[in-house]
Image: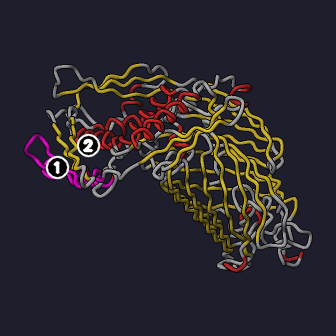
């Protein structure tokens, strides 16, 4: 009797599964998954839900359900899970619900099982050596810090591939151009643990041979060779190859700059280097128009000339108009590799008019900036500046009118800044952090009108919580102080809060002290913080929910945590090649002000 019932149930399930063949898939859901969300799993399916937009606007044909397509998708899911360390993954019979008009809701029932964990990782070099006997301490440390596979962590196939490349690279950095690593994995299915065994064959030690340069025309070859980090006869190193390519590209004269080691089948111990160059056009132009909530209609144009004054110098002529900058004209001359290979000297004369909520001024100035790049993630700059300011309006700032400074004044001094950026990927980070600091002082040379110090520190951190889900945090603190005893700080050097990249429940510069006319006064102390959760709705569309806090205070060293302004809101952004573009909507909370603010941004607010 029981056997008969079982046979009948199997026949019914099979009939239900086949009876919906060629129905449109309207919805797809997963049950039993915890390691990966539905969006991630859908990426591995051939069966995809249909929609009016896909069919009518994007002209995509719907994928109809068939048993064979379902079984193919089960194989795809199984392969995906096994690569992620879930060797015991299973997919049970699907649940199919008929909606209407020959449309179905398809539910995958998955059993993930326990993931395989890495018990230990062992390295053997040339069959007899340990990794500590064959690699310098610096390369050993890189392997320890950057290896993806770690003891007591889940095993993943992709991490093996990435660690394999890392191992080969560290040996190639000390001269072993032919280094090759392989791995074997011993899995204990009872304890769900794996032992990873690495076997590395270094091959012969190689040296740099002759370097050939092709493709250059207007840039002298000696300028290119000056960027080489090696000489013929030195121990070959991939690190030197990469750094040389970076130095050459930093000259800013080339559209393409590639270095290739010429390795023949005979595996010689002396390796020639081929440098292929494709020079950029001597003259280029850029032009753009747009509209923003704060700057309204904006338009800009830029003209660039390469090989200006020196063979590797370049000059840019730039013009811009918007509501915030009625005019901004500047000439920028850049000379790369001045004192060291990866640096630049920038001479930057300009004239501009600024219409900010708190002030209006005309500014004519000249900046000399020395920019030094220490690595892909760390750079610094030092700027000598001179500016003539003409204020059209001066707010009262709690001073009597006869005590206000003249509306025409000069500034001259020095500013120093650095930035440490390791967020990845750069335009839409899901992990890593950034740290930026700048300090500016006025009155060091030529003039001592309104001397001051101004510093700003900003920290950002990104956590990838799961696939498609990221938590982002930003903290910012600023301090400014007049150093002549007057207490007066020029309006353009004060801090302001509120806006699309600040506390988003307020309009630009609207948060903080104001004069009797409601005009923002700015302040000498700034504190801001933001927390944001970003979730991928599709591969391109990102939904965000955020909380911002911050304020500015009139006096220096005057921070009051009980006087912060708070706002909350949501955003919708679309990923583009230049970063996410989207809209944020927010309004103040714990505050009498209740109006909504809309901000349109290119790139994430932080």
Residue beneath disc 1: 131
Q: CA distance from mark 2 to mark 1?
A: 10 Å
From the top left corner, tell me how far across and down residue 519 is, in percent: 86, 66
Residue range in magenta is: 117-145
Query: Which of pointers 2 and 1 lies earlier in the amino acid sequence?
Result: 1
- Give the position of the C terminus as an image quadrant: bottom right
Helix, strand or loop under label 2: helix
Q: Name the foreground residue: 147 vs 379.
A: 147
Helix, strand or loop under label 1: helix
Residue beneath disc 2: 167
Q: Name the foreground residue: 543 vs 555.
A: 543
* Image color mode: secondary structure
- For label 2, the crowd category at 10 Å Cα-Cα, with few meaning under 14, some 14 to 19 and many 20 or more, is many
Q: Residue 144's quadrant in the figure?
A: bottom left
**Residue at the image point whose x is 21% and y is 37% from the top:** 182
Q: Is residue 560 left or right of residue 390?
A: left
- Give the position of the N terminus as an image quadrant: top left
**Residue at the image point whose x is 33% and y is 23% from the top:** 274
From the top left corner, tell me how far across and down residue 276 is, in percent: 40, 23
- For label 1, the crowd category at 10 Å Cα-Cα, with few meaning under 14, some 14 to 19 and many 20 or more, is some
* Residue 313 visible (yes or no): yes
Q: Name the foreground residue: 99 vs 308.
A: 99
Please say if the residues under marks 2 and 1 sit with CB atoms less than 8 Å apart: no
**Residue at the image point whose x is 46% and y is 45% from the top:** 110
Q: Residue 487's quadrant in the figure?
A: bottom right
Image vertical order of residue 503 relative to residue 280, above or below: below
From the top left corner, tell me how far across and down residue 510 is, in percent: 81, 64
Q: Name the foreground residue: 522 vs 473.
A: 473
Image vertical order of residue 78 relative to residue 383, above or below: above
Based on the picture, tell me whether residue 5 belongs to the magenta stretch. Answer: no
* Residue 379 visible (yes or no): no
Based on the picture, tell me whether residue 140 belongs to the magenta stretch. Answer: yes
């Amino acid at each position: 009797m029981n056997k008969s019932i079982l046979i009948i149930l199997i026949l019914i399930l099979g009939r239900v599964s086949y009876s919906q063949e060629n129905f449109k898939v309207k919805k797809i859901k997963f049950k039993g998954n915890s390691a990966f969300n539905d969006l991630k799993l859908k990426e591995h399916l051939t069966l995809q839900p249909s929609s009016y937009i896909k069919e009518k606007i994007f002209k995509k044909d719907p994928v109809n359900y068939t048993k064979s397509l379902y079984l193919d998708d089960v194989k795809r899911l199984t392969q995906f899970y096994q690569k992620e360390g879930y060797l015991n993954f299973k997919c049970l019979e699907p649940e199919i619900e008929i909606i209407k008009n020959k449309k179905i809701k398809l539910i995958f029932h998955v059993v993930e099982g326990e993931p395989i964990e890495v018990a230990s990782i062992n390295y053997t070099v040339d069959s007899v050596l340990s990794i500590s006997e064959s690699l310098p301490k610096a390369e050993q440390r890189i392997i320890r810090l950057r290896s993806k596979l770690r003891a007591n962590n889940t095993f993943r196939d992709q991490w093996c591939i990435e660690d394999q490349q890392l191992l080969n690279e560290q040996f190639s950095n000390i001269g072993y151009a032919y280094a090759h690593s392989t791995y074997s994995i011993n899995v204990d299915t009872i304890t769900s643990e794996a032992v990873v065994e690495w076997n590395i064959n270094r091959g012969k030690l190689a040296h740099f041979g002759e370097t050939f340069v092709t493709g250059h025309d207007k840039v002298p070859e000696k300028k290119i060779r000056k960027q080489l980090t090696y000489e013929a006869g030195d121990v070959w190193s991939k690190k030197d190859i990469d750094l040389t390519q970076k130095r050459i590209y930093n000259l800013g004269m080339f559209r393409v700059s590639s270095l290739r080691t010429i390795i023949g089948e005979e595996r010689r111990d002396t390796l020639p280097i081929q440098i292929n160059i494709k020079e950029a056009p001597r003259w280029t132009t850029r032009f753009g128009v747009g509209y923003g909530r704060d700057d309204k209609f904006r338009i800009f144009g830029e003209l660039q000339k390469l090989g200006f004054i020196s063979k590797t110098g370049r000059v840019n002529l730039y013009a811009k108009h918007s509501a915030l900058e009625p005019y901004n004209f500047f000439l920028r001359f850049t000379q790369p590799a001045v004192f060291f290979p990866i640096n630049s000297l920038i001479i930057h004369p300009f004239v501009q008019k600024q219409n900010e909520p708190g002030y209006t001024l005309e500014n004519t100035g000249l900046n000399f900036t020395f920019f030094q790049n220490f690595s892909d993630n760390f750079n610094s700059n030092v700027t000598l500046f001179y500016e003539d300011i003409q204020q059209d309006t001066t707010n009262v700032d709690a001073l009597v009118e006869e005590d206000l400074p003249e509306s025409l004044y000069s500034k001259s001094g020095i500013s120093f800044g650095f930035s440490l950026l390791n967020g990845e990927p750069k335009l839409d980070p899901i992990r890593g952090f950034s740290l930026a600091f700048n300090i500016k002082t006025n009155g060091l040379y030529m003039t001592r009108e309104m001397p001051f110090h101004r510093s700003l520190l900003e920290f950002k951190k990104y956590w990838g919580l799961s696939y498609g889900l990221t938590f982002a945090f930003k903290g910012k603190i600023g301090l400014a102080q007049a150093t002549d005893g007057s207490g007066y700080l020029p309006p353009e050097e004060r801090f302001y809060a509120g806006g699309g990249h600040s506390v988003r429940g307020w309009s630009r510069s609207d948060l903080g002290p104001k004069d009797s006319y409601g005009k923002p006064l700015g302040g000498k102390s700034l504190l801001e913080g933001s927390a944001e959760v970003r979730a991928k709705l599709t591969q391109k569309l990102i939904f965000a929910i955020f909380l911002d806090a911050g304020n500015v205070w009139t006096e220096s060293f005057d921070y009051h945590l009980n006087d912060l302004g708070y706002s909350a809101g949501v955003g919708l952004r679309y990923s583009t090649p230049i970063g996410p573009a989207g809209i944020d909507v927010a309004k103040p909370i714990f505050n009498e002000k209740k109006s909504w603010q809309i901000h349109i941004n290119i790139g994430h607010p932080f």
